[in-house]
Image (cartoon, helix red, strand yellow):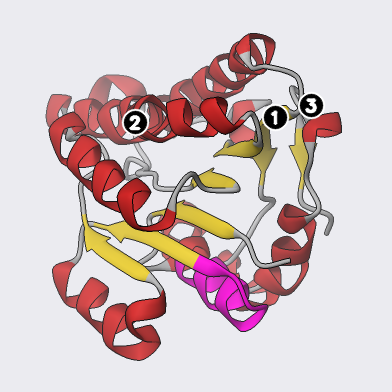
Amino acid sequence: MSKVIVVTGVTQGLGRAMTVGFIEAGHTVIGCGRSLDRIKELSTQYGAAHQFSAVDVADDAAVKAWAAKSLDRFGPPDLLLNNAALINENAPLWEVPTEDFDAIIDVNIKGTANTIRHFLPAMIARQTGVVVNFSSGWGRSTAAEVASYCATKWAIEGLTQALAQELPRGMAAIPLNPGIINTDMLQSCFGSQARHYPTAEEWAEIAVPFLLKLSARDSGKQLTVPA
């Protein structure tokens, strides 16, 4: 059965790869990203059956308008995937500029809360649907020079497990560690060593069917995409 899937951060990396995978599997994607040019490319490539919008998830008013437009056209999503995230350039915490730290908090934590705030009530009214908040290995462990990113992903783990306790039966909220993938974000941390890990496209071949199988029985579980 075809699903309606909301994905944040669709213009690059995991979001872009998931979008392609879901569409190729016959599902409808409602996606957002901050790059207007890349959003236009996706809209041109995939046409009116899907919806791609230039939205900064850290902007609550923008997310509210995007959600209202999406819900009016497609109804409540079956899957809400909070994938959009930022990371700091490698640096000790005290050297991370205030504006960078604030942006990471605003996108990674507040952005996730914004999409939940504006999409989830319609899902609850229908009493079906799965929310997947993308965490990280660094949401369950730590590393030097990425403290701000670790802080947000640990927050996502707690936020999601608490949300799982609030949802009605038949629904799910899941914190998901996607694994280690060769994306621009990983390259910023690992440099040339990132090439030793799967590409986003290779990852999506496993992740897309894995995500489509998630259900209420997985609610609150700390899951990881199989390697």
Residue 33 in the figure: left or right of residue 139: left
Q: Are marks 1 and 2 in contact (CB under 8 Å)?
A: no
Name above or below for residue 28 compared with residue 160.
below
Q: Main secondary structure of the magenta part?
A: helix
Magenta span contains residue 164: no
Q: CA distance from mark 3 to mark 1?
A: 9 Å
Q: Residue at x 70, y 29 (%)?
A: 171
Q: Residue at x 47, y 30 (%)?
A: 120
Q: Residue at x 68, y 17 (%)?
A: 168
Q: Is residue 197 visible?
A: no
Tag 3: amino acid: Lys
Q: Residue at x 81, y 53 (%)?
A: 213
Closer mark to the observer between disc 2 and disc 3 = 2
> Label 1 belongs to which residue?
172
First in sequence: mark 1 vs mark 2: 2
Closer mark to the observer between disc 3 and disc 1 = 1
Q: CA distance from mark 2 to mark 3?
A: 23 Å
Label 1, secondary structure: give it: strand
The boundaries of the magenta stretch are 16-28
Count neighbours of disc 2 (C-alpha within 10 A) and say few if under 14, some if 14 to 19, many if 20 or more.
some
Magenta span contains residue 21: yes
Where the C terminus falls, by quadrant?
bottom right
Tag 2: amino acid: His
User: Residue 136 appears at what percent x and percent y?
Assistant: 61, 39
Tag 1: amino acid: Ala
Q: CA distance from mark 1 to mark 2?
A: 17 Å
Where the N terminus falls, by quadrant?
bottom right
> Label 2 belongs to which residue?
118
Residue 122 in the figure: left or right of residue 98: right
User: Residue 205 appears at what percent x and percent y?
Assistant: 73, 74
> Label 3 belongs to which residue?
221
